Amino acid sequence: MQYKAYCFDLDGTVYRGNEPIASAVTFIHALQAKGIEPFFITNNSSKTVAELQLTLEDMGIVAQADHIYSSALATAKYITENFAGERALLIGSHGLRDALQRAGVELVEQGGSIVVVGIDREVNYMKLAAAAVAVQHGATLLSTNQDVKFPTEFGFVPGNGAFTELIAGVAGVKPIYIGKPSPLMLKMIARDHHLRKQDMVLVGDNHDTDIMCGVAYGIATIHVDTGVTRSKDAIHATQRVAQLTDLL
Ligand SMILES: [Mg+2]
């Protein structure tokens, strides 16, 4: 085993919906047998760390809580580090609410100097309007992730990025995105666990979020063919990025 820290994306990499991906589970067990505890990083902000831990347990994986990094947890950390003591207006599910409350972030229904947006399947016009008004009056717009859509058995449905862009468009600002492809979660893993970049590798199924996150942070990446992007397309896309970067 070449690396000390294997950082696995979840959906499309470790499992698909409720189905574990056997090759990933086998690989994770092999790592653990050698004493290497994997990390898990997900853009999903709707679940708490405890719920993600249970989901992994259902797949036959025992994950350490402090090795699970969700965009909800990362957003809460980002706020305590950069906007300590500020009040936040929240659009999001209980996973994000839980992470913010545990971090001591005060939540408000109106106003606030930060607007935090995560996937909220009960979002409505008044919530979006309150967020747009707060941001145009100067609140910072933070969003767990920029995925505009995600696939279901019926077709694509709106992801958190779609609602974030709506608020940003009305208020005329650019959001700060916390989840992949931003390298923030990898940075937090490196800092919290004292890891060097050369000891880390990111394993993911989505070129635009996972692989680009690893590339942005400057660590090795492994693309798996079990989810969103096919490996042959990811290789071509990453080579194009590498060549473009060389030109800079
Ligand atoms: Mg994925």
Image: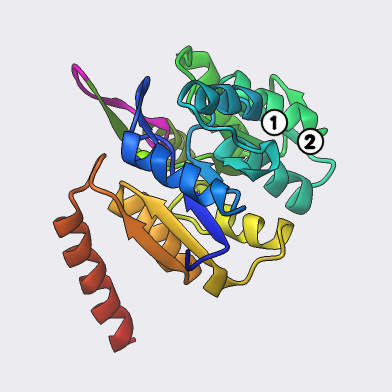
Task: Name the image quarter holding residue 152.
Answer: top left
Q: Is mark 2 within 8 Å of ligand 1?
A: no
Tag 1 residue: 99
Residue at 51% across / 28% down in the picture? Answer: 56
Disc 2 marks a residue whose amino acid type is Ala
Disc 1 marks a residue whose amino acid type is Ala
Residue 103 circle label: 2
Residue at 26% across / 67% down in the picture? Answer: 238
31 sits to left or right of 99: left
For ligand 1, the image quadrant comes to top left
Q: Is residue 186 above or below residue 46?
A: below
Q: Give whichever of 219, 110 is nearer the camera.
A: 219
Q: Give whichever of 83, 62 is nearer the camera.
A: 62
Q: Mark 2 and mark 1 in contact (Cβ < 8 Å)?
A: yes
Residue at 33% across / 41% down in the picture? Answer: 23
Q: Find the residue positioned furthest to the bottom.
A: 247
Q: Find the residue positioned furthest to the front.
A: 33
Q: Which residues are magenta?
A: 153-161
